[in-house]
Image (cartoon, rainbow, N blue to C red):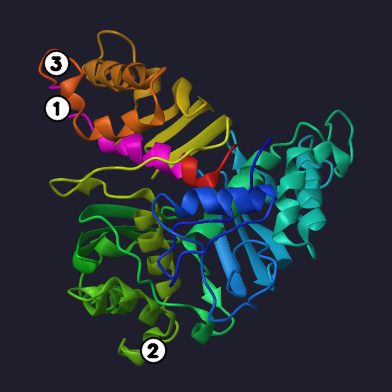
Amino acid sequence: MKRVLLAALSVVLVSTLTLTGCTKADQASTNNAGQQGQATAVNTEKDAGAKDEGPKYVDGLYRGSYSDEIVVRFKLADNNITEISFQTLKHGGTNYRDLKEGDEKYPILVQNNQALEYLTGKPLSALVDLDEPGDFIDDIDGFTGATIRTSKIQSAVNDALNRGVYTPDNVADVSANTKDYPNGSYRGNFEGQVLIGFDLENNTLKNVKYRALQHGGTNYLELKEGDPKYAVVEQQNQLIAHLEGKHLSTLKDLYTPGNFVKDIDTYSGSTIRSSKLISAVNDGLNRGPYKPAEGFVGTIIEYEDGRYRGVFEDQVLIQFDLVGNVIKDINFRLLSHNGNNYLKMKEGDPLYPVYQQNLQALEYLEGKPLSAIYDLYKPGDFVKDIDTHSGATIRGSKILMAIKDALNRGVY
């Protein structure tokens, strides 16, 4: 049975929450807090004798995704979901939000909306009910309520909670991050729009740069001075310049960008989407170092048995089972780069050896304890050289980042 991942790795927190309740949400919070982070904290004090019912999330708007198929946005008030909607809902080339009544797949849209309607007005603990969608989703024509993929909705909500509040109702409620993170290079992603890379050294941000910055079909990194939208690029660069060389706690400043981002032409510093950058940095921290500094030692906690799915950017989607913290049945559901779909390659293709080497990485993990994932930092130790392709050059970190994302989301 799935657990709800209510303990997230977020950069807008202040102290580890010790959770003692009996719900699956509480268990998940306790487990995940021991690995790389804690839940998003609020500046409130609890009565000494009060029962701990799990992490308290900041009131406000949250956004999270599952692969490129589902993006949800929802509002929280006192850990209750007051509004929730799909920003994206698609699969297999079908954009369900565009479907009209009468389309043969329209019932799937209706059923997914029923899942969100069920959650509206309920506490976060109701997320576990998505394990049994047939209990509250109607059968429509040939589509049964038990077969819609509510696991994807749950994964997207968990992802949102992991990233921390997107737009807080009150910025003062957000606590600056004081957690210690390992030194190294990090990568984070926000819905494919913002890809960020940065280094951490003693919790100081260095070499902060965009790896992608796009929206609505515009690639802002390709714009030149004089373009009508170039002002947006200048403002986004002011955001990362504000972070450069500063302590990680400075990230909280991005919730009020108008305090330090200059107005340019008709673009106000208070209107740029700095929350996307916050979310991307949080995502990077949640996954841990993409390239750790020398001497890094990864830690692993006990995870619930079940099936997990995780993604790294638009390149790797991985699935695996855990049984007693041992990896079973691990496989790629997506493996692509620069337009190359490795899962469709056949022997004789020039890049086929790269596919084979990635498969060797998964074969190495099969049947091993979860702690073996950190061996992916040095894939040359177990991945064979094939033709001109060295086992040391495959991107084991991408596989590792996808696995860490799966663990952060909880059981699929």
| First of labels 3, 1 by sequence position | 3
Residue at left offset 57%, top offset 66%:
62
Q: Nearer the viewer, mark 1 or mark 2?
A: 1
Q: Quadrant of residue 369?
A: top left
Q: Which residue is mark 3?
A: 385
Element type where label 3 sits in the image:
loop
The percent position of residue 256, horizontal first and vertical second, equals 42, 85
| First of labels 1, 2 by sequence position | 2
| First of labels 3, 2 by sequence position | 2
Residue at left offset 16%, top offset 24%:
380
Q: Amino acid at mark 2?
A: Gly
Label 2, residues with CA under 10 Å away: few <14, some 14-19, many ≥20: some
Residue 102 visible here? yes
Q: Amino acid at mark 3?
A: Asp
Q: Amino acid at mark 1?
A: Ala
Label 1, residues with CA under 10 Å away: few <14, some 14-19, many ≥20: some
Q: Quadrant of residue 133?
A: top right
Q: Is residue 120 left or right of residue 280?
A: right
Residue 64 vertical position relative to residue 363 in the rendered view, above or below: below
Residue reaching furthest to the left: 388
Q: Which residue is mark 2?
A: 258
The percent position of residue 399, horizontal first and vertical second, equals 34, 34
**Start and end of the magenta stretch?**
390-406
Residue reaching furthest to the front: 49
Element type where label 1 sits in the image:
loop
Q: Which residue is mark 1?
A: 392
Q: Quadrant of residue 132?
A: top right
Most foreground residue, 179 or 11: 179
Q: Would you say residue 392 sits in the magenta stretch?
A: yes
Q: Nearer the viewer, mark 3 or mark 2?
A: 3
The percent position of residue 250, horizontal first and vertical second, equals 31, 78
Residue 352 vertical position relative to residue 377 in the rendered view, above or below: above
